[in-house]
């Protein structure tokens, strides 16, 4: 059978003439690697979201990796420390903890929720000497920021808010990304805003910002203002030149000007995109609820910026339903790799799974995700979704 055309993709960016022209303009001007357009993009991101100083990077995964290393480099974490993570999320929202020589502490999600249970996090802080947390706001649904802040203060944990799926979301009018010492964003193609691949780190203060900027660029001293070619530098037999003075062992996680040119245009349309996503999400939820599916979390709550709708079917098993939907052109995902600590990549690695870790396991078995892209023929998509759900529910 030929593959059915996709009528409801999981993610699809909104790209127009503006992005095309900006990209071409940068290309023709020779603005390829990281330069002034990246800085313009960072400034535009800062003024659009008012979250703090922004550092553009090559992906959300690298944003998380750098953020963890920033906390190590600045002495806020030390090798071997325990860091709380979610097991029901995308791999690189947790993996950087292990990559950096820290111990992940997997915290369960709440019942029928996609977000980490903050009650479980608090209980784990009491029991496990947790030094930090890398916490995603899952699928566009913000965590309770007031509670997260109380936990951060009470237990003295450093926090990275992973906002890769939750750009623009707010909790009681407070934007995600304002509690953490650092916050991270992803601009992968299917996300709220895209630069093809790309990401952003937001830092709560100048020290963290400087360290993130340095780690992004090999570990370079990004504030170097000394003389050039004045060999040696103090007692060090190195040639001072602002490009080649290194404070840290870093990475190359730079975004390019070509990507940033797209990002600058994307930021101008972000409100429209978010509104369109919410409209798709609302329509998808209506159809799912009409078929008695159990929605996970509160994807349409005030302040949420839906990334995907997570649900558990009640009239049919998840596998049969997923296959039926895909046959009709509705793209379906399972819960992004949950349960992460049970993936082969964690075999034999230091980790703690905080019991009872049952909700995340249940989600990994039964939860399905449907996207809410901003550009879609909504009437067709919802009619096909309705038809596909109905036909899957019929007795065989
Ligand atoms: C919660 C979360 N964190 C991090 C990432 C990684 O982002 P990227 O794909 O830009 O590397 C993703 C990817 O979708 C994600 O969903």
Image (cartoon, rainbow, N blue to C red):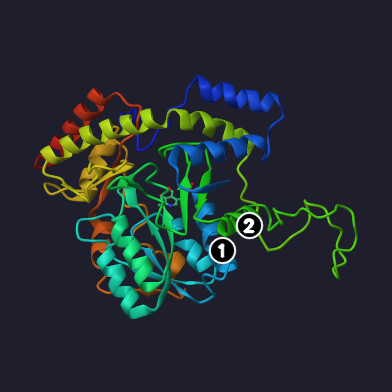
- Please indicate whether residue 78 sits to the left or right of residue 282 in the image: right
Of residues 151 and 115, the one nearer the viewer is: 151
Q: Residue at x 89, y 53 (%)?
A: 229
- Please indicate whether residue 256 sits to the left or right of residue 230 in the image: left
Q: Can residue 1 be seen by looking at this rendering?
A: no
Q: Give the x, y percent position of residue 353.
A: 34, 73
The quadrant in which residue 143 appears is: bottom left
Q: From what the image shows, is residue 43 above or below residue 244?
A: above
Q: Give the x, y percent position of residue 192.
A: 40, 38
Point out the image quarter for the C terminus.
top left
Q: Which residue is mark 1?
A: 69
Point out the image quarter for the N terminus.
top left
Residue most extreme to the left: 395
Whether residues under marks 2 and 1 lie with C-beta atoms below 8 angstroms apart, the answer is yes
Badge 1 element: helix
Q: Residue at x 23, y 41 (%)?
A: 300
Q: Residue at x 68, y 63 (%)?
A: 249
Q: Which residue is mark 2?
A: 215
Q: Residue at x 46, y 65 (%)?
A: 345
The earlier-in-sequence mark between 2 and 1 is 1
- Please indicate whether residue 265 sits to the left or right of residue 84 in the image: right
Q: Give the x, y percent position of residue 47.
A: 49, 38
Q: Residues within 10 Å of mark 1 (few under 14, many from 20)?
A: many
The quadrant in which residue 7 appears is: top left
Q: Which mark is residue 389?
A: none
Of residues 245 and 350, the one nearer the viewer is: 245
Badge 2 element: helix
Q: Can residue 363 be seen by looking at this rendering?
A: yes
Q: Is mark 1 within 8 Å of ligand 1?
A: no
């Amino acid at each position: 059978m030929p593959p059915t055309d996709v009528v409801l993709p999981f993610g699809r960016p909104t790209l127009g003439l503006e992005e095309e022209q900006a990209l071409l303009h940068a290309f023709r001007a020779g603005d390829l690697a990281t330069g002034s357009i990246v800085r313009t993009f960072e400034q535009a991101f800062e003024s659009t979201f008012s979250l703090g100083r922004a550092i553009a990077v090559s992906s959300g995964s690298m944003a998380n990796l750098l953020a963890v290393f920033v906390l190590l480099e600045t002495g806020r974490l030390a090798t071997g420390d325990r860091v709380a993570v979610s097991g029901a999320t995308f791999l690189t929202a947790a993996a950087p903890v292990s990559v950096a020589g820290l111990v992940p502490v997997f915290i369960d999600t709440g019942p029928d929720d996609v977000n980490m249970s903050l009650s479980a996090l608090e209980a784990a802080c009491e029991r496990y000497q947790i030094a930090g947390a890398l916490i995603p706001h899952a699928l566009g649904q913000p965590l309770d920021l007031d509670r997260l802040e109380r936990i951060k203060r009470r237990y003295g944990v450093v926090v990275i808010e992973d906002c890769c799926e939750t750009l623009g979301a707010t909790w009681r009018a407070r934007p995600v990304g304002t509690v953490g010492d650092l916050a991270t964003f992803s601009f992968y193609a299917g996300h709220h805003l895209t630069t093809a691949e790309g990401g952003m780190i937001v830092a709560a203060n100048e020290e963290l910002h400087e360290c993130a900027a340095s780690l992004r660029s090999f570990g370079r001293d990004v504030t170097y203002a000394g003389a050039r070619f004045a060999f040696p530098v103090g007692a060090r037999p190195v040639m001072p030149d602002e490009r080649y003075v290194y404070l840290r062992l870093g990475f190359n996680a730079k975004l390019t000007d070509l990507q940033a040119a797209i990002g600058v245009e994307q930021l101008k349309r972000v409100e429209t995109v978010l509104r369109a996503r919410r409209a798709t999400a609302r329509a998808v939820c209506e159809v799912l609820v009409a078929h008695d599916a159990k929605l996970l979390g509160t994807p349409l709550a005030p302040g949420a910026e839906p990334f995907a709708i997570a649900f558990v079917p009640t009239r049919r098993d998840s596998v049969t339903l997923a296959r039926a939907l895909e046959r009709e052109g509705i793209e379906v995902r399972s819960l992004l790799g949950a349960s992460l600590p049970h993936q082969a990549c964690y075999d034999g690695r230091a980790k703690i799974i905080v019991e009872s870790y049952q909700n995340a396991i249940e989600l990994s078995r039964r939860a399905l995700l449907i996207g809410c892209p901003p550009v879609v023929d909504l009437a067709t998509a919802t009619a096909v979704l309705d038809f596909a759900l109905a036909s899957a529910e019929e007795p065989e």
